[in-house]
Image (tube, grey):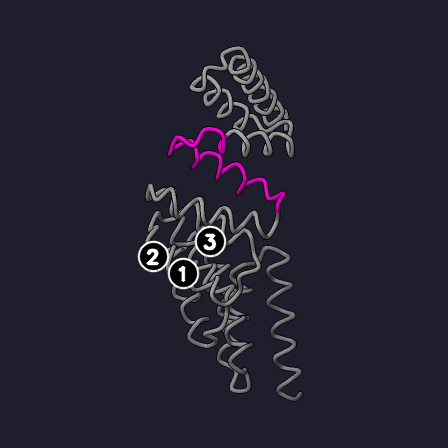
Amino acid sequence: MNSEQELSNLMVAAYNHQKNGDLSLAIQAWNQLIKHPEADNNLTANAHLSLGNLHQLQGNDELAIESMSKAIKANPNSSEAYFCLAYLEQEQENFESAIGYFEQAIALNDTDPGVFNNLGNCYDRLDKSADAINAYTQAISLDDNYIAAIYNRGNAYIKIAKDELALADLNKAIELDANFYQAYYNRGTLLKRMGEHTQSEQDLIKAKTLAQQELEHKTLQ
């Protein structure tokens, strides 16, 4: 069996183990591939990336971060590895570090609205509303129906008392998803601040009804 076939077999085995939920066996297969003398940098980087995702699924964030870092070392142009590192840091509430990794991911690939949305969330958690709004706006420029960024930007506008802009975003979020109870609740709270008490009350009642329906649906599952 030649080296190309050996590498292919290891990849197939790793993916099959992942598909079957055998994470430990998948990790073993990826490690074998990494140690293979004929594995090039791109293949090694992808293997480390897969390992990082598996370690994350196992709840071992330290090993996940180590694997993602090795992926970047093998392929410094891996935007996905930077994104995964950023996400891990975001989950651990290391927002400054996460921002750095998100910005490196964007420098390599600026076409993913989800990356900009996550970047905005990090800025928001640091109370950097202007930076958060800018990141959300970039996400929306890539996908003008990206509801998460629209909703998040609306909330960021609320924080800096740009009520009309906030209202426009929350209206858009509700237009995109008529069952978005969080958007109804935040719009109701905003409208109360703006003196629109009748509409505010309607929104708050709607939010409560939708939230109860969602809870009941989850209970039945």
Q: Are discs 1 and 3 less than 8 Å apart at CB?
A: no
Residue on which the image places disc 1: 101
Q: Are discs 1 and 2 less than 8 Å apart at CB?
A: yes
Say which amino acid is labelled 1. Tyr
Question: In which quadrant will I find the N terminus?
Answer: bottom right
Say which amino acid is labelled 3. Gln
Question: In which quadrant will I find the C terminus?
Answer: top right
Q: Separation of disc 1 and disc 3 at Cα?
A: 22 Å
Residue 27 visible here: no
Residue 3, given in percent of the width and then of the height, sits at 62, 87
Q: Which residues are magenta?
A: 144-166
Tell me the number on the disc at residue 58. Answer: 3
Residue 174, given in percent of the width and then of the height, sits at 61, 29
Say which amino acid is labelled 2. Ser
Q: Residue at x 53, y 71 (%)?
A: 47
192 vs 75: above or below: above
Secondary structure of residue under mark 3: loop
Between 130 and 94, the one nearer to me in the picture: 130
51 vs 211: above or below: below
Q: Residue at x 50, y 15 (%)?
A: 196
Tell me the number on the disc at residue 97. Answer: 2
Residue 84, given in percent of the width and then of the height, sits at 47, 59
Between 120 and 207, the one nearer to me in the picture: 120
Of all residues, the one furthest to the bottom in this rendering is: 2
